[in-house]
Amino acid sequence: MDKIVQFVQKSEHNATAVAIFGAIGVAVVALKALSFLKVLVDVFLRSGINLKKYGAGRGGWAVITGATDGIGKEFAFQLASKKLNIVLVSRTESKLKAISEELEQKYSIETKYYAMDFAKGADEDYQGLQQLLTPLEVTVLVNNVGTNHDIPTPFEQESDKVLKDIIEININAAMKMTKIVVPQMVSRKNGLIINLGSFAGLVPTPFLSVYSGSKAFLSSWSQAIGAELAPKGVHVQNVNTYFVVSAMSKIRRANLLIPMPKPYVKSVLGQIGIPGGASTPNTSTPFYSHAIANWAIDNIFSRGYWVNHNYNLQVDIRKRALKKREREAAAAKSQ
Ligand SMILES: NC(=O)c1ccc[n+]([C@@H]2O[C@H](COP(=O)([O-])OP(=O)(O)OC[C@H]3O[C@@H](n4cnc5c(N)ncnc54)[C@H](OP(=O)(O)O)[C@@H]3O)[C@@H](O)[C@H]2O)c1
């Protein structure tokens, strides 16, 4: 009889445990499903802060670094189309002048441009840029300029020049540009700073280790200064970018996961203040397929799994890049 009572009690305990764990399981799955639904609502249904808040159509100026090609050039055109005046910054004066003239003609806005090489990190270049920007009402800064390892390379084999350039262009330029414009944004209690982040900053990327670290810096720094500057009226947004067709990505054709700069930048500017697929503060993953990928990285498998995924991906890219180099060297020899 005792044994039967014990068996019944044990069964009741087991049933209670199964019910508790079942309920926890259902709650976890429901929360995950809700967080996924929120990503879809963010990227397909919500609209971000209107750029009019940041001086569009009211004489505000947007400063864009790396503004003559790829994503930066697209920022220049789309911000100009919203009636922000534009300051373009990159190295090649002829390209700056041509884009500047095109923007003025097409959108009836004012433009200025400034040629400098961020890799040099020269104080006099930043001082000259500060002189240009001080009299303007700068309401938007897009820290877009960036550089990467030429091909995936083991850290110990990478040239010191490449490592120095990545730090100077991806990290120091963003900090120095922000230091130039933030005081005037704070004094007006209004400003928007967009930093061009990368999935390489979200998941450490072997063989692009210093680029990956530089984008992780941007992510962490954006969250930290975002909290500092929010009470002062300045919104900071790090945008998590997967691949976009551009010279830097060396990708020429768009697909579902790899947009052209135009739809990509449209998604960024349409979702100011909205996280999309991002799960950290002051961060946005606005392009729909990137947002879903960001959600998957945060919610499916461990971070170790994704680092390993990146390792295998970069090993493969490196192999193909080295073969391409060999082919090019052989072709050059035979000429
Ligand atoms: N494309 C992607 O798949 C992807 C993915 C994740 C993140 N991102 C980020 O998005 C940003 C823009 O990338 P992108 O693909 O649009 O690049 P891109 O097409 O190669 O354009 C780079 C721009 O920066 C300028 N630039 C390059 N080096 C410079 C330097 N040392 N000093 C001043 N200007 C310089 C270039 O003009 P000049 O040559 O005339 O100077 C050009 O206007 C970067 O921060 C990148 O890390 C891109």
Image (spheres, rainbow, N blue to C red):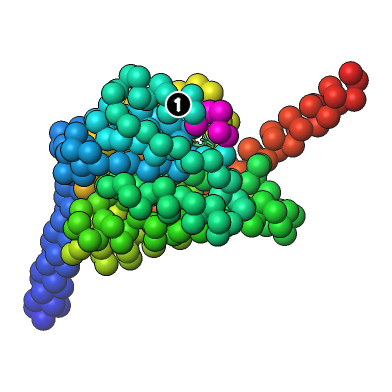
Dot 1 corresponds to which residue?
A: 99
Which residues are drawn in magenta?
Answer: 92-96
| Main SS category, magenta section | helix
Whether residue 73 is visible here, answered yes or no, is yes
Quadrant for the C terminus in the image: top right
Label 1 secondary element: helix
The residue drawn where x is 53% and y is 40% is 115
Quadrant for the N terminus in the image: bottom left
The residue drawn where x is 49% and y is 56% is 127
Quadrant of res 11: bottom left
- The count of marks equals 1
Residue 60 sits above or below residue 186 on the image: above
Lateral position of residue 226 relative to residue 161, left or right: left
Q: Nearer the viewer, residue 330 or 78?
A: 78
Q: Is residue 9 magenta?
A: no
* Structural crowding at the residue carrying mark 1, measured as other residues with C-alpha within 10 Å and reported as few (<14), some (14–19) or many (≥20): many
Lateral position of residue 63 relative to residue 247, left or right: left
Q: Amino acid at mark 1?
A: Ile
Quadrant of res 293: top left
Residue 6 sits above or below residue 187 on the image: below
Residue 307 sits above or below residue 245 on the image: below
